[in-house]
Image: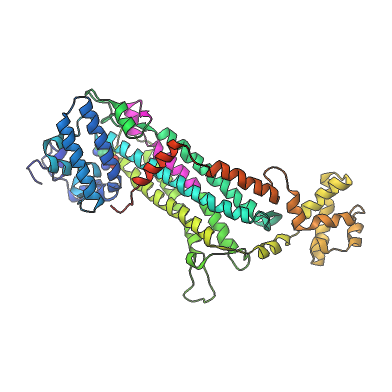
Amino acid sequence: MGKDGSGSTARQLWGGHFAADAAPLMQRINASIGFDHRLWRQDIMGSMAHARMLAACGIITEAERDAILAGLQRIREEIAQGAFSFRPELEDIHLNIEARLTELVGEPGRKLHTARSRNDQVATDFRMWVREAMDRADELLRALQEVLLDLAEAHAATIMPGFTHLQAAQPVTFGHHLMAYVEMFGRDRGRLRDARERLQECPLGAAALAGTSFPIDRDMTARELGFRQPCANSIDAVSDRDFALEYLAAAAICAIHLSRLAEELVLWSTPQFGFVRMSETFSSGSSIMPQKRNPDAAELVRGKSGRVIGHLVALLVVLKGLPLAYSKDMQEDKEAVFDAADTLELGLAATREMLRSMSVFPERMRRAAGVGHTTATDLADWLVRAKGVPFRDAHRIVGQVVRLAEERGVSLDALDPRELAAIDPRLDEGARAVLSVEASVASRRSFGGTAPERVREAVQAARARYLAATTGDEREAAKAGRASADSGGA
Ligand code: ARG
């Protein structure tokens, strides 16, 4: 441990009353630089805003501010170029950057930490990182919706079996089925947007927990860092990780949506279904069975959802029972969020490309749509509509028709008209017209229903709702998020 004041270990920076070095095991359990290096852009941005504010409020001189800004700019370049050495003995990203700053610019570097603490610093950095992750997810969700909408439009009239209990239920259109996912991903975007809105309060200036005796301007730093306003309570500012929980909750729900879609792709691509085939670029073969084409990417999207859910639960448990304000337990927030974001973003992109590149087999879907007497409800509805039969009675009559078809081993429309009439004389020739899957689907014209014309309308409405240009504000924010999106590899 150097005694030259250059800050070669964390204790050099803050260990005025410490005589002993950290034990190696202490360093291992304590250091977060192995993962929180991913906050480097946000940390530099936050420090720059803080330095400008300190100067504007007369707490440091303009010359000191300029030295700090130049040093931070240099560090930014060093890290971007991979020329920065992250040191575990300096614990975390905050101390690594501060130590290097002091190495570069001397005394002004040691003034940067005036009127702040790592507690408000990390809370600010992490909020900015999560905000960018929200924007990236929104962008990826939008791109996924775009692919789903194109597919849904192309297959607005492609008939497939709709299932309940995974038993053939009623014919639907493939486009309609896909549009269900457009709605789910639309809600995911809404959840992220809501959470982003609540995240927009800046902890910087809360200092360790109590605020500071220096005449700082919290509005200035909040504004410069893209927040709406400073957090109102300094204790809450450093203790709150709701933004991370809300991101993880939104990510977990989204991952479940991805997983359900992936599960359907897995099912649909079996030879038994044969509705779709994953492109060769998104599947793999078997090392023993030459005929296999496995939907590995879909299986992994399904499997990885477990990690995202796990990270949500992990952080909930970390926070449960923590007294106010900051405790080191909270350092556990970052790996959870980083891995959830990596996993979610990969899953969103892979799902988009799987869908874009897969083949669809409408003929297979059409054939399966008629299996399992899926138009039985149409026959019952017809009895109600054309013959004035109460629905419960119609249901019983058609039940007998289905039993007969099963005994004969034929579909409903292949039954002998005399046999039908024997079950109930009102089952005359008119009944036949409603038994085709085409007629069934075309008749489901209620709002939100599966009729091809409704699906086409739904596609148009969803395009307007989800793909229309975002507001300038949102676009700017999204761009800023992209520009500083970290690669995770720094
Ligand atoms: N690395 C720490 C974290 O991520 C930074 C805050 C440290 N604060 C403290 N009082 N030790 O939580």
The answer to whether any part of residue 323 appears in the image is no
Q: At which x and y percent is residue 156?
A: 66, 53
Q: Residue at x 62, y 63 (%)?
A: 275
Q: Relative to 12, is 469 on the left or the right?
A: right
Ligand 1: quadrant of the figure: top left
Q: Which residues are magenta?
A: 228-255
Closest to the observer: 422 or 462? 462
Total number of numbered discs in the rendering: 0
Q: Main secondary structure of the magenta part?
A: helix
Q: At which x and y percent is residue 217?
A: 27, 25
Magenta span contains residue 439: no
Above/below status of 484 relative to 169: above
Q: At which x and y percent is residue 333?
A: 35, 43
Figure coloring: rainbow
Q: At which x and y percent is residue 124?
A: 32, 36
- Quarter of the view holding residue 123: top left
- Quarter of the view holding residue 234: top left
Q: Residue at x 67, y 44 (%)?
A: 448
Q: Residue at x 40, y 45 (%)?
A: 314
The answer to whether any part of residue 272 appears in the image is yes
Closest to the observer: 251 or 329? 251
Q: Relative to 27, is 291 on the left or the right?
A: right
